[in-house]
Image (spheres, rainbow, N blue to C red):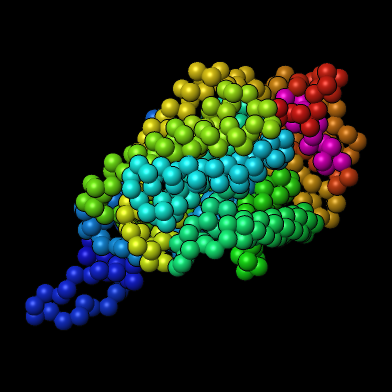
Amino acid sequence: MDAVRRSLGSLYVRPRAPRAGQGREPPLTVHHLNQLLLVCSVVLLVAVAAVRVSSRSGLPSLLVYLGIGVLMGQDGVGDIHFNSAEVTQVMGYAALVVILAEGGLGTKWKEVRPVLKSASVLATVGVAISVGVTAAGAHYLVGLEWRQALIIGAVVSSTDAAAVFSVLRRIPLPARVTGTLEAESGFNDAPVVILVVAFSQAGPVEHWYTLVGEIALELVIGAAIGLAVGLIGAWGLRHVALPASGLYPIAVMAIAVTAYAEGALAHGSGFLAVYLASMVLGNAKLPHWPATRGFAEGLGWIAQIGMFVVLGLLVTPHELGDDVLPALVIGLVLTMVARPLSVVLSLAPFRVPWQEQVLMSWAGLRGAVPIILATIPMVNGVAGSRRIFNIVFVLVVVYTLVQGPTLPWLARMLRLGEKGEASDLGIESAPLERLRGHLLSIAIPTGSRMHGVEVGELRLPPGAAVTLVVREEKSFVPLPSTVLRRGDELLVVATDPVRDAAERRLRAVAHGGKLAGWLGTDGADAGR
């Protein structure tokens, strides 16, 4: 472990003094690098195995990753003394960009579009209500100074994108609930970061309306840049055939990171820019999309694991004892008062059923984002910033343990679970540049209503045809009377003008069966 600590270089900010009679430690070698790689690979394997445990228990896997970091820290078996808030903040921001990009790529526009206004209000007005109520509770019930109370109120008012995406996508909730919560978690990071930075600066905030105007301006700039970068990137990827399929995932992630960088450099919200750009790319029907989605998901997992482990390293467990009770009190105010009040008041104009409001109030999951934001006052040297970090850490851990596993139970109690929906198709498109067409690869999932449909009954538009069927590792050219089965893989060739229509028709049949279209089922409502 000594070699691992030395290999961490500048991250190991409090090295032990050399023993008497010893000089400086020898320089790092390839052997030390090999040891570091071994430790990192073991941590990744343990984290991957922990996902299975967390999926069964309903707990977000972030708790396991935090535990790994704590075990590796100075109070654990690793004895790594890491206390660099600056490095943690930089690594956290980088990981958050990847996580938001992965979340945006997986967000379906047809689910977000109907709830875009309500999610936007919840991510702005709702955040303001939550900050005020939580800060009041921290000041009057815990005795924190107003500056510290406002910082904590702002830090914990952001729902965590990683926690929300990982938990909600395993629960069969109505599309309106899932879309609202996912969009809120993608949108509310931007105003919360601005608030935390403002409250952490030296001196008081002079005029509240100046702060509101600054938040609005940064959100507008970030949204404009994100949408522009996403649209331009999607257009380019759809019209330029890259020589290798593995280049498409790299290009998509590069475009998403570009949106963040341009938004931040333009003094806008880079987090909002990367989320919107990724959402545009994710709904643009890009070539080799399943491969791109898998690549982004893998990067998202690596970002989560690395971020949570570093946050676990930063915390000092033996210093948390005095902050447990304040964290429980503030968390109780946040969970039982601030969050429900922000949901009720923000969604009042949209006539959301009370059952959905109850679930949204309880589903305001916190995760790494509040802990990362708690490093901002530490970097700025705010008085009591270490206590703020400890309170936020305890709050996140305790209330994640409470909220995560109970979400499926609450959804069943409120009768919000959706069952029996047909599985959607995963359609991968590879461009055929010289033929001016596309080769669509389709796998028929278990719950698809395409099972039992004849090829001729697909009624694909002229210019599109099923050219090959792969069944039980054997391929054959289908006839119009060939009956499709679940588990089949189809290759469909479609020209450019009819590519979108062919894909809509395939999705419609997958959800509505052979009578899709005649009974009112089409590609537009296939996912409802």
Residue that extends furthest to the right in the rendered view of this protein: 462
Q: Is residue 479 above or below residue 437?
A: above
Q: Position of residue 386 (x, y in %)?
A: 32, 58
Magenta stretch holds residue 372: no
Residue 503 falls inside the magenta stretch: yes
Left of 282 or right of it: where is 388?
Answer: left
Q: Report the magenta residues as a range.
A: 498-511
Q: In which quadrant is the C terminus drawn?
A: top right
Q: At 74% from the left edge and 47% from the top edge, which residue is drawn?
A: 284
Identity of the residue drawn at 48% across and 42% down: 133
Q: Quadrant of residue 463?
A: top right
Q: Position of residue 316 (x, y in %)?
A: 26, 54
Tally of numbered tags:
0
- Towards the viewer: 284 or 406: 406
Q: Answer whether residue 441 is visible to the viewer in this image.
A: no
Nearer to me, 364 or 283:
364
Asked if residue 89 lies left or right of residue 169, the reply is left
Relative to 210, residue 347 above or below: above
Asked whether, in this view, residue 256 is left or right of residue 113, the answer is left
Q: Quadrant of the N terminus?
A: bottom left
Please give the name of the residue rendered at 38% of the width and 32% of the height, measured from the top-left corner. 402
